[in-house]
């Protein structure tokens, strides 16, 4: 990558990659921003002589960011135990289709704009990552998603490359698709049908669109109303969705991309109240993740 003496532009240019790595490791854009900023702070506080010794600033920044994320993941369990209700990863918008004013964003680039929207940031994928140990998650994400060699991952985890390879293999076993894959257009059709049935309070159609064993998880963080435990079963979920519609007159549902996949945004009086992501198998909804915590909806409310 060249030597640091080449200037600071190359260092600043690593930010996009680091944000992408940190978000996938942490599932939180806010924490990812903080981790990357911390890594840059450590870089700029190095003596110039030490900077000159580092021939790959990008690799150095990735290693430091990875270690910071590893520490945060290690403390996440105790923080999650204090969290009110279910904890969900922070949902991300697609800025090409979403601005609060309907106009193109202006001003400084939002960190959410730097996230590459692909299958590795879908809510389903991020939720699976949450089931891994911190070491498994770091090894898997860095190797399988970003193609970092195990030798470099070993520097982050303080383990041998062979041990890191085993960690990634263990994590990989948790990531396995079930049922028939649904094309993107098919997923969008299912979500659109859910939106229409929800708006029409058509419980029979909703039940038909939901897998009988579907699960809906809501994250209010104790800040807004949300079910504290997952709602299980297609019929119970459909009844719950209709009850929400009855209690929230004027609720507007928008078809929007959520973490790179078709999803729904619920607005009331122009304010984003809920962002819903879906997992769809065999053309039926199997999982719904509804984020209501206002702190996690900031990327959806920042003005252009």
Image (cartoon, rainbow, N blue to C red):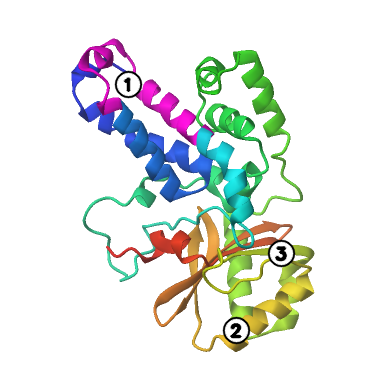
Q: Is 63 drawn above or below residue 249 in the view shown?
A: above
**Which comes sooner in the sequence, label 1 or label 3?**
1
Relative to 43, is 208 on the left or the right? Answer: right
Neighbour class for label 3 at 10 Å: few (<14), some, many (≥20)?
some
The circle drawn on residue 245 is 2
Secondary structure under tag 2 reads helix
Q: How many marks?
A: 3
Relative to 284, is 295 on the left or the right? Answer: left
In space, the residues marked 2 and 3 are separated at their CA atoms by: 18 Å
Residue denoted by label 1: 57
Q: Is 147 drawn above or below residue 162 in the view shown?
A: below
**Residue shown at the point (49%, 60%) measured from the top left:** 257
Residue 176 at x, y percent in the picture: 72, 41
**Which comes sooner in the sequence, label 1 or label 2?**
1
User: Is any atom of residue 163 visible in this view?
Assistant: yes
Residue denoted by label 3: 230
**Which comes sooner in the sequence, label 2 or label 3?**
3
**Magenta residue check for 64:** yes
Secondary structure under tag 3 reads loop
- The residue range painted magenta reads 43-70
**Magenta residue check for 212:** no
81 or 260, which lies in front?
A: 81
Neighbour class for label 1 at 10 Å: few (<14), some, many (≥20)?
many
**Residue shown at the point (46%, 33%) measured from the top left:** 68
User: Is any atom of residue 116 visible in this view?
Assistant: no
In space, the residues marked 1 and 2 are separated at their CA atoms by: 52 Å
Residue 172 at x, y percent in the picture: 68, 33
Neighbour class for label 2 at 10 Å: few (<14), some, many (≥20)?
some
Relative to 94, is 279 on the left or the right? Answer: right
In space, the residues marked 1 and 3 are separated at their CA atoms by: 44 Å
């Amino acid at each position: 990558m060249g030597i640091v003496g080449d200037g600071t532009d190359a260092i600043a240019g690593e930010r996009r990659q680091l944000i992408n790595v940190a978000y996938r490791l942490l599932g939180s854009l806010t924490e990812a921003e903080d981790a990357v900023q911390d890594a840059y702070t450590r870089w700029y506080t190095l003596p110039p002589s030490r900077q000159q010794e580092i021939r790959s600033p990008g690799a150095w920044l990735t290693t430091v960011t990875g270690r910071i994320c590893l520490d945060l993941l290690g403390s996440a369990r105790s923080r999650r135990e204090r969290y009110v209700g279910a904890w969900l990863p922070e949902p991300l918008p697609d800025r090409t289709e979403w601005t609060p004013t309907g106009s193109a964003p202006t001003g400084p680039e939002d960190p959410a704009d730097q996230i590459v929207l692909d299958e590795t940031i879908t809510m389903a994928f991020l939720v699976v990552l949450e089931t891994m140990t911190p070491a498994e998650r770091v090894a898997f994400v860095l190797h399988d998603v970003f193609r970092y060699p195990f030798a470099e991952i070993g520097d982050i985890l303080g383990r041998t490359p062979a041990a890191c390879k085993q960690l990634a293999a263990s994590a990989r076993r948790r990531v396995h698709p079930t049922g028939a894959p649904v094309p993107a257009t098919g997923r969008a059709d299912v979500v659109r049908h859910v939106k229409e049935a929800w708006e029409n309070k058509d419980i029979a159609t909703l039940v038909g669109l939901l897998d009988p064993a579907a699960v809906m998880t809501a994250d209010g963080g104790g800040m807004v109303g949300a079910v504290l435990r997952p709602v299980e079963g297609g019929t119970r979920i459909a009844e719950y969705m209709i009850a929400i519609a009855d209690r929230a007159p004027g609720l507007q549902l928008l078809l929007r991309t959520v973490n790179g996949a078709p999803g729904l945004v619920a607005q009331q009086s122009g304010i984003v109240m809920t962002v819903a992501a879906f997992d769809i198998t065999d053309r039926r909804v199997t999982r719904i993740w509804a984020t209501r915590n206002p702190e996690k909806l900031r990327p959806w409310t920042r003005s252009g």
